[in-house]
Amino acid sequence: MSPDKRNAYIHGYSEVEQERLRRQAELTEFEIYSEVNFSMVENLLEVGCGVGAQTQILLRRFPRLKATCIDINDAQLEAARRTLGDLDYARGRHEVLKMNAEKMSFPDSTYGAAFVCWVMEHMPNPMRVLSEIRRVLKPGGRVVITEVMNFSYFLDPYCPAIWKFWMMFNDFQYDRGGDPFVGVKLGTFLRDAGFTDVRTNVKLMFADKREPELRTKLLRDREELMLSAADELLKSGQVDVELVEAMKKEFTEVLKNPNAITFDSFMQATARVP
């Protein structure tokens, strides 16, 4: 596998994709942060900050917090600087830096906590990143990681084109050096990286006819997620135009279905430095 493919982000860096990330952060905020408490943390490292969608939530929820945010992509970093620079409550409380998470330039024992969200799935060497996070955290410092488990996605009624596209999506991410199922492995990874007090918690994103507004938002979010990778999958030959159109048609139909059910889960792991 070539270095370019190993480091490719399959969703791209367009403004449309950047807006999708912001909407996704808003939609998933309750589940991601329901058990996250950084109220006593003063300096936090966010690995893979992207467009700053999670950063703005962190700074809003925890007023004492100052965040150092790193990412490797210039377009995402510029978007993060714009997003955070426009927020009064974020001014003077964040720093956005271009940096490789596998080899950070920070001294040992710099940060009181670290936050990672939807990032490990795109990294070819998650253990190397975890080792670096452990190095830069102070003794007793805590890391919170939220990651995908794409095998858990369920949709009723059965939609064969959506399901086929989703399998191709996951295969493609593997081919690019990512791991669309990394969430289920976090407990093992954190223990092997030398962390202690390792805990994992499965989080659910589920809606049926009892919550039609939430169901609609979750379905649209999933459609946008899949379409964000469609161009790359088409270029690679992983899918064809017919499948993409069939997938879009099925989403249109299931959004009209009053009995539709959507279910997904992800993993949140926490651990401490000894």
Image (tube, rainbow, N blue to C red):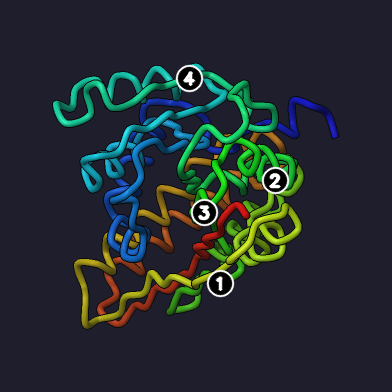
Spot occupied by residue 219 in the image (x, y as percentages of width and height)? 35, 62
Judging by the rendered image, the residue that carries numbered circle 4 is: 97
Closest to the observer, 186 or 198: 198
Q: Residue at x 52, y 69 (%)?
A: 153
Q: Residue at x 28, y 51 (%)?
A: 39
Label 2 sits on what residue type?
Answer: Pro
Asked if residue 15 lies left or right of residue 48, the reply is left
Q: CA distance from mark 3 to mark 4?
A: 20 Å
Q: CA distance from mark 3 to mark 2?
A: 12 Å
Label 1 sits on what residue type?
Answer: Ser
**Marks 1 and 3, the one that precedes in the sequence:** 3
Label 3 sits on what residue type?
Answer: Ile
Asked if residue 230 lies left or right of residue 57, the reply is right
| Secondary structure found at label 4 | strand
| Secondary structure found at label 3 | strand
Q: Residue at x 58, y 59 (%)?
A: 166
Q: Nearer the viewer, mark 1 or mark 2?
A: 2
**Marks 4 and 2, the one that precedes in the sequence:** 4
Q: Nearer the viewer, mark 1 or mark 4?
A: 4
Q: Are marks 1 and 4 in contact (CB under 8 Å)?
A: no
Spot occupied by residue 227 in the image (x, y as percentages of width and height)? 47, 45
Q: CA distance from mark 1 to mark 4?
A: 34 Å
Check the picture and name the quadrant holding the N terminus: top right
**Within-10-Å neighbours for mark 3: few <14, some 14–19, many 20+:** many
Judging by the rendered image, the residue that carries numbered circle 3 is: 145
Judging by the rendered image, the residue that carries numbered circle 2 is: 126
* Above or below, 244 relative to 191: above
Judging by the rendered image, the residue that carries numbered circle 1 is: 152
* Above or below, 273 relative to 235: below
Q: Which mark is residue 65?
A: none
Q: Are marks 1 and 3 in contact (CB under 8 Å)?
A: no
Q: Nearer the viewer, mark 1 or mark 3?
A: 3
